[in-house]
Amino acid sequence: MGPAYRLFYDEPLRPVRAFGTKIIDARGDEYLDAYNNVASVGHNHPHVVAAVHRQLQTINTNTRYLQPDIIDYAENLVATHDAALDNVMFTCTGSEANDLALRVARVVSGGTGVIVTENAYHGCTRDVASWSPASGTGAMLGRDVRLVPAPDTYRYDAAQVRELFLNSVQTQIDDLARRGVRLAALVVDSIFSSDGIYPDPGVLAAAADLVHRAGGLIISDEVQPGFARTGAAMWGYQRSGFTPDLATMGKPMGNGMPVAGMVAQSRHLDAFAEDVAYFNTFGGENAPIAAAQAVLEVIEGEGLMANSRDKGDQLVVGFRTILDRAGFAADVRGSGLYVGVELVHDPVDKDPDAALTSAFVNGLRDRKVLTSAAGTYGNVIKIRPPLVFSQSDTDRLLAEFEHVARDLAAGRSPGRSVSVAGWQPPNRDDLRRLIAEELRDMMGGSRG
Amino acid sequence: MGPAYRLFYDEPLRPVRAFGTKIIDARGDEYLDAYNNVASVGHNHPHVVAAVHRQLQTINTNTRYLQPDIIDYAENLVATHDAALDNVMFTCTGSEANDLALRVARVVSGGTGVIVTENAYHGCTRDVASWSPASGTGAMLGRDVRLVPAPDTYRYDAAQVRELFLNSVQTQIDDLARRGVRLAALVVDSIFSSDGIYPDPGVLAAAADLVHRAGGLIISDEVQPGFARTGAAMWGYQRSGFTPDLATMGKPMGNGMPVAGMVAQSRHLDAFAEDVAYFNTFGGENAPIAAAQAVLEVIEGEGLMANSRDKGDQLVVGFRTILDRAGFAADVRGSGLYVGVELVHDPVDKDPDAALTSAFVNGLRDRKVLTSAAGTYGNVIKIRPPLVFSQSDTDRLLAEFEHVARDLAAGRSPGRSVSVAGWQPPNRDDLRRLIAEELRDMMGGSRG
């Protein structure tokens, strides 16, 4: 497998089984999954597995035939969105959904300019990578792609955040215009997960107005906040108070079955459909759609939005208390089961502490709890468990977090001794080398 | 669902169940599937369904964890390729695989030029659509994308085909160079399915030399000919006698479970991996990989390559005999269960007869046999059934084909009366309108 692959953790995990919020590794150890948002209604959820199995025994073909089950799901999905978003197109991945959304935005606006945040990630196709600055320095940004700083609610107050963000958007629109480039779209993840998780900037409705005034579209990338994750609404844009022109969905949509899509105001699709016969072989096949339908039913039937809010609130309060008690400078922010813990060297300068963050993530992994790091400086612990996270899961996560915090505060880990100013990826280069070697060893035998 | 969707046939099919080579529609009628190459080992193949079901009950997560089942499949897949192709990266769709391949080719070659055939189709991401002229006039071709005519073995003899194709490739390379554009890649489907199905042009080894001399890569798009479809080799490039730098796979890989990939000479991946941390959430998940592993086992265990050759040979001979007897001017060509029947007005001018082709496709559909049309002029009947096509399936297809041919020869269908010169899509505009109306009716009720 190609050297562009990366694994998680200093000591990569070897999972062999999973269920609900638990992953079992090759040694038989049980891990608490506080990270995977794909298996959003829980690993191997029986309702989803049964729906897929039933469908695979019935039929699993594509959207070039008329199929009521696919149309039923399309209607059910569209019904969860704002009324203006009345149409859906299915893709296989979130990357394809974003790729499609910007194709549509370019046709509708007649423009090519794209605005995203400085550490945004929207996908891995060539086009989407060209407006995903977090893809790595080798993925060249497009000529007409402009970056704006994420709304950093930790370092600025509400008024400053608003002024900085909106000024940045307008400045980029104006600068594009001075070069004869019309705006196609502002693409935004309304909780800014890749930038470091800022759930409450309160800037997006006003930003949407600026974008519309410039003739552009606003695209809400719901891959992270969508499907009730934030505990406050089914969709991130609903929580953030704006109606996008296009919204894209991915990861949790089929609980691991590959399915994704784009909902749209149908007037936007007419121009696109005029000339392009879009077809996505796997996008909207019956089996992934059966999974997606089952996911909607579980979210509703098990009250996962309320659960997400409840457990998320507990985690935010718990993390704050633990970090205060242990004497760490940190900001804890989140919405539902999307929680970020930003760690800094001191509460005044707020200099990012990526080494401490990495020590927390690997310390939790050693204690059988899976999390990861996010943010431009890699100094935000990302907690994003399956939405079926129970009360005992919550208690266990907080207990282990407290244990790691105490160890680190007592200087028992190397993490505390390294001071980091500015960006430093959490062990990425070392990891890459180790993994390449490990994989080479594992695969070397049979290939000569 | 968006208006860019298209359905098959004048009267769209409403399938509700499938197994093997059969699809059952809402009226309970059984159709012989002579078209779907995704369900390549047969609809709902029990070995594949069981493998997926077992995996969904065990674990279905991503490639950021170490997982022997995924590495095992990677090794098994790579072992079916030429030794030089020693590395694999998984994606979710063939479009993503082609998108990734060209990202790699651009990095490796330092070039941006792309050469494809005039009616090629390689996928639906924005980038891939920009070098897929068959995507429709609204999908703009890239500035550095050059087209060469497909090797038309019906209208030219072997020496002419060779001269025309190789001259065209070299002319485009030279013209790109005159404008300061270096070649990144020639991308080719070795049986030229979208161009009209030309399995035996005998030009690709020489073309690969020209491309390599110019510093470009040759990418074999195996979505159509791969996985034993041609009956002559596991991969199209093996049958056509060249070794590509990168080969991409899709549709039949998981028999309907979304999984795709790119195999590569590993030296090409090093430069790419230097800077880009490629991650595809659904690409290489356990459940799609379980399906892919089961597919390899069925191809081997049920001897599907030999079956494809055997039944394909029978079909070619059978179609030729039937068309001769009925007095139609046609060329029948194919390799294994990828057969094209090109219909023309007369055997001298060879003027494409798209109306007759459409009449055949819809006539077969009326007689419960599913096929489709291909080619630049829409005048090639495309026969591409699941590889488990049995002797009785073959007999049934030939019997129904003969019935339709006789009816059409007797002038009982409107198809014969319409004379078509040059390009005319087979009823597409009418279809689009009808479908849009039908879908609007079906979906209108509940959204008000």
Image (cartoon, coloured by chain):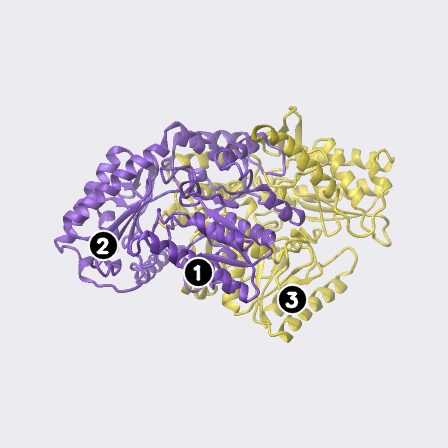
Chain colours: A purple, B yellow
Left or right: residue B11 versus residue A77 is: right
Q: What x and y, as percent, mark residue A430? A: 30, 62
| Discs 2 and 1 share one subunit | yes
Left or right: residue A125 versus residue B402 is: left
Farthest residue, direction top = B28
For residue A352, above or below residue B250:
below
Q: Which mark is residue A147?
A: 1
Farthest residue, direction left = A410
| Discs 1 and 3 share one subunit | no
For residue B266, above or below residue A204:
below
Disc 3: host chain: B
For residue B213, above or below residue A441:
below
C-alpha distance separating marks 2 and 3: 56 Å
The residue under label 3 is B206
The residue under label 2 is A359
Disc 2: host chain: A
Q: Where is residue A298, by image quadrant?
A: top left
State the count of labels.
3
Q: Where is residue B139, by image quadrant?
A: bottom right
Instruction: Find numbered disc 2 in the image and state the secondary structure of the residue it sits on.
Output: helix
Q: Nearer the viewer, mark 2 or mark 3?
A: 2
- On the question of residue A146 being in view, the answer is no
Of residue B239 and residue A358, the one placed in the foreground of this image is A358
Quadrant occupied by the C terminus of chain A? bottom left
Amino acid type at mark 2 = Ala
Amino acid type at mark 1 = Leu
Amino acid type at mark 3 = Ala
C-alpha distance separating marks 1 and 3: 45 Å
Instruction: Find numbered disc 3 in the image and state the secondary structure of the residue it sits on.
Output: helix
Q: Nearer the viewer, mark 1 or mark 3?
A: 1
Task: Work out whether mark 2 precedes mark 1 in sequence or the reverse, and give the earlier one.
Answer: 1
Instruction: Find numbered disc 1 in the image and state the secondary structure of the residue it sits on.
Output: strand
